[in-house]
Every structure is written in C-alpha cells, then in structure tokens.
Image (tube, rainbow, N blue to C red):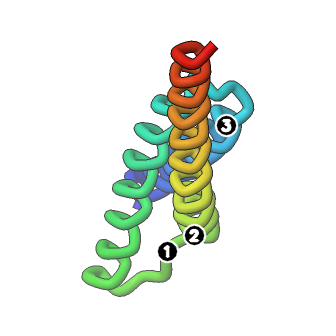
Amino acid sequence: MEQYNNKAIASLVLGIVSLVSIVWSYFTIIGIICAIVGLIFAIQIRKAGELEGFKPSSMATAGLVLNIIGLALCAIVLIACVACVGLLGTAAMFS
C-alpha cells in the first residue's frame, strides 16, 4: 500500500509542476512530460485498485485531474507559442 501512496504523491506533485510550468511558456515541454508521467502513475494506481480491491486515495484522483488539466493547457500554450513564432517569422519576411 505504501508504494501506491508514493505514486499518488508523485502524481499530485507532477500535476502541480505541469500547471506551474504554464506560467513560463518556455518550459511547457517539461510540463507536458511531467503531466504524462503523472498520468501514468495515476492510471497505474487506479488499475491496481481495481485488481486488488481497494479504493484509490483522493491524492491519486487529484493527481489524475491535475495532470489531465496540465497536459491540455500545456499543449495549448505550446501550440500558441509555436504559432506566435511562425507569425513573427512571416511578418519579418513581408517587412
């Protein structure tokens, strides 16, 4: 049970890191990686709970939610940054 608690804490922390990385748009790739790893931990806890017959902790559920939100927002910010750089590149060509 202890390993599941550790994975739940890791999932929660990685979800928070992925959300914080949105503030600095250069680190969105790190946020995406953290969110994916956190999702893997949260899904492992859920599957283990189904197999072994226990209810996942609320930290695991919070980590799952934070990682999903973090992954979606980091992807949006990364796409927006790439689009801005592309617009700046094309604007420089026409001036």
| Mark drawn on residue 22 | 3
**Three-letter code, disc 2:** Thr
For the residues bearing labels 3 and 1, Cβ distance under 8 angstroms: no
Q: In the figure, residue 60 lies in which quadrant?
A: bottom right
Q: Tag 3: residue type?
A: Ile
Quadrant location of the C terminus?
Answer: top right
Residue 89, image x, y percentages? 53, 19
Measured as percent of width and height from the top left, residue 92 is found at: 58, 14
Give the mark nearest the N terminus, 3 or 1.
3
Query: Dividing the picture into quarters, in which one does residue 42 lie?
Result: bottom left
What's the residue type where badge 1 is placed?
Pro
Label number found at residue 44 = none
Residue 56 disc label: 1
Q: Secondary structure at mark 1?
A: loop
Tell me what residue is drawn at x 35 percent, y 86 percent: 53
On residue 61, the disc is 2
In the rendered structure, the answer to whether residue 51 lies left or right of residue 28 reads: left
Relative image position of residue 32 (x, y in whole percent): 46, 41
Identify which residue, 78 or 31, lies in the foreground: 78
1 or 2: tag closer to the N-terminus = 1
In the picture as drawn, the residue positioned furthest to the front comes out as 94
Real-space CA distance between mark 1 and mark 2, rounded to the nearest whole angstrom? 7 Å
Taking the spot 29% from the left edge, 80% from the top edge, the residue there is 52
> Alpha-carbon neighbours of circle 2 within 10 Å: few (<14), some, or many (≥20)?
some
Residue at x 63%, y 70% (from the top left corner): 58
Disc 3: CA contacts within 10 A as few (<14), some (14-19) or many (>=20): many
Q: Estimate the spatial distance between the alpha carbons at disc 3 and disc 2, rounded to whole Å.
A: 21 Å
